[in-house]
Image: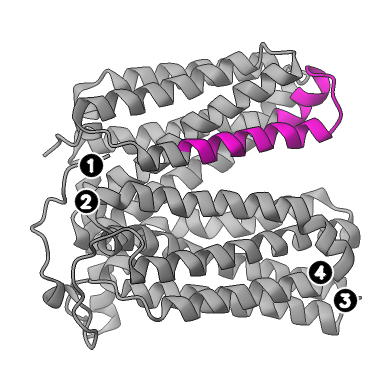
């Protein structure tokens, strides 16, 4: 896919390079030196994160027996992204993106190593370890909040414009692949090695990633530094508001961001209620919950690969992406009617294909339709909106499940139908379609 180029004129590599950095030539291929360094580092750290996630869940469950505590740890990790998203994008635009990426991985690595140390030195001090876990979740969430916009803003500068979608696809395929491996062997490794070694592995993987990222060259024109903290606050406020105004002033982009946020809000209850669907409607054991999640993930990988290889342009791209949104929503509604396990697997796989394609297209369109100096703010805003909607959708989905006596068929139908109406309405709007086609000015 080839969305419209950034509004601003292309930057000269020498002028765009950070102070003290060597000028870099425009990338000629996908697997160039800089993107390969970034991709390999992220792949290793993603594998480590899967290991520590399994360790956190199992250790907390065994040490405390509290599901509420697990939920609160998840909230602690997600909350900084909601609160810091738009401001984090401003940070990514005003400071060295490479520096942010490296610092984020270093801080997260040291935080996870602190958990490993607490478990190793004070294995019976449950309250202490839980406190360290919460501090690590909050700190890692804050670092992830600035890391995401910095990575998203940097990708278009690391690969040729025609390969941005493929780069996004590769990053997400590696994330899904590391999830497969982590989910398959994480429990076994926890039983054999224990939680301290898994947290140690994750901490080392973050530091390895940071070491790899230190050698990346990211062209970037940095704004003039502020002289005082008051001036800095005023500049950050002005820049963040400028990012909000930029999105709001483009009807197609605005509709796109809010449609994606609304779609996430409406579809995420399905994932909350999927265990009840397996037991109450498919009449299968818990293993089938894993099978359905695997089908969704396998479909997402297929969608990511498809999105990275298809060269869609103009109105054809608009039609494909709108159809993928509507199709995923319709499949969500149809899943509530399915009672045959194998058919449910097929539906989940197809849902994953549609959502995987949409995910790559969303990121790529936002990246390539935004000026480089504002890309971090737009990416941060989009991520914050999506993260803000999903926890609310999860909470309301659980409440709806209890109020309806776990009538998941009804909830799936209502959520999927509403998402289909939302997607179809957006896809028929001229401004929305123009944005997807790369024709919005």
Image point 18% across, 79% down: which residue?
A: 23
Asked which secondary structure carries label 3, the reply is loop
Q: Residues within 10 Å of mark 4 (few under 14, many from 20)?
A: many
Give the label on residue 370, or none.
2
Mark 2–mark 3 Cα distance, whole angstroms, equals: 49 Å
Q: Earlier in the sequence, mark 1 or mark 4?
A: 1
Asked which secondary structure carries label 4, the reply is helix
Asked which secondary structure carries label 2, the reply is loop
Mark 2–mark 1 Cα distance, whole angstroms, equals: 14 Å
Give the label on residue 195, or none.
4
Q: Nearer the viewer, mark 1 or mark 3?
A: 1
Image point 46% across, 77% down: which residue?
A: 212
> Residues at badges 1 and 4 in contact (C-beta under 8 Å)?
no
Q: Is residue 85 left or right of residue 26?
A: right
Q: Nearer the viewer, mark 2 or mark 1?
A: 1
Q: Which region is colored magenta?
A: 274-303
Mark 1–mark 4 Cα distance, whole angstroms, equals: 45 Å
Q: Nearer the viewer, mark 1 or mark 4?
A: 1
Task: Give how far across and how far down residue 260 sits, in percent.
Answer: 40, 35
- The N terminus appears in which quarter of the rendering? top left
Asked which secondary structure carries label 1, the reply is loop
Where residue 429 sits, quadrant-wise, is: top left
Give the label on residue 2, or none.
1
* Residue at the spot of label 3: 125
Q: Earlier in the sequence, mark 2 or mark 1?
A: 1
Mark 4–mark 3 Cα distance, whole angstroms, equals: 14 Å
Seen in the picture, residue 213 relative to 369 is either above or below; the reply is: below
Seen in the picture, residue 311 relative to 54 is either above or below; the reply is: above
For residue 317: magenta? no
Task: Give how far across and how far down residue 386 sits, in percent.
Answer: 45, 43
């Amino acid at each position: 896919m080839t969305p419209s180029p950034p509004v601003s004129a292309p930057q000269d590599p020498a002028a765009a390079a950070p102070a003290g950095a060597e000028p870099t030539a425009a990338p000629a291929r996908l697997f160039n030196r800089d993107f390969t360094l970034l991709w390999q580092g992220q792949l290793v750290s993603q594998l480590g994160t899967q290991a520590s996630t399994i360790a956190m869940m199992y250790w907390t469950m065994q040490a405390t027996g509290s599901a509420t505590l697990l939920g609160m740890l998840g909230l602690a990790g997600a909350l900084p992204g909601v609160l810091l998203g738009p401001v984090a994008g401003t940070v990514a635009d005003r400071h060295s993106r490479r520096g942010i990426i490296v610092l984020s991985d270093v801080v997260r690595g040291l935080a996870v190593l602190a958990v490993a140390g607490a478990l190793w030195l004070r294995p019976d001090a449950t309250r202490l370890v839980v406190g360290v876990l919460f501090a690590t979740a909050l700190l890692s969430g804050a670092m992830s909040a600035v890391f995401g916009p910095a990575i998203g803003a940097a990708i278009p500068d690391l690969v040729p414009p025609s390969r941005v979608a493929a780069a996004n696809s590769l990053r997400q395929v590696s994330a899904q692949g590391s999830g497969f491996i982590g989910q398959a062997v994480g429990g076994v490794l926890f039983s054999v090695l224990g939680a301290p070694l898994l947290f140690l592995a994750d901490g080392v993987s973050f530091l390895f990633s940071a070491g790899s990222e230190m050698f990346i060259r990211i062209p970037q024109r940095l704004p003039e530094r502020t002289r005082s903290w008051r001036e800095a606050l005023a500049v950050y406020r002005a820049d963040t508001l400028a990012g909000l105004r930029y999105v709001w002033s483009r009807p197609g982009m605005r509709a796109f961001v809010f449609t994606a946020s609304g779609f996430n809000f409406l579809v995420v209850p399905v994932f909350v209620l999927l265990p009840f669907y397996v037991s109450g409607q498919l009449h299968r054991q818990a293993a089938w919950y894993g099978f359905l999640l695997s089908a969704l993930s396998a479909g997402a990988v297929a969608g990511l690969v498809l999105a990275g290889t298809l060269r869609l342009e103009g109105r054809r791209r608009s039609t494909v992406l709108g159809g993928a949104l509507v199709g995923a929503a319709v499949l969500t509604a149809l899943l509530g009617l399915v009672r045959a396990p194998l058919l449910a697997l097929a539906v989940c796989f197809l849902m994953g294909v549609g959502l995987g394609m949409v995910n790559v297209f969303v990121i790529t369109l936002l990246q390539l339709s935004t000026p480089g100096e504002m890309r971090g703010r737009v990416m941060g805003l989009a991520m914050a909106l999506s993260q803000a909607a999903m926890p609310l959708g999860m909470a309301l989905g659980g409440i709806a499940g209890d109020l309806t006596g776990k009538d998941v068929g009804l909830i799936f139908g209502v959520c999927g139908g509403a998402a289909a109406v939302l997607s179809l309405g957006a896809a028929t709007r001229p401004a929305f379609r123009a944005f997807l086609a790369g024709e919005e000015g």
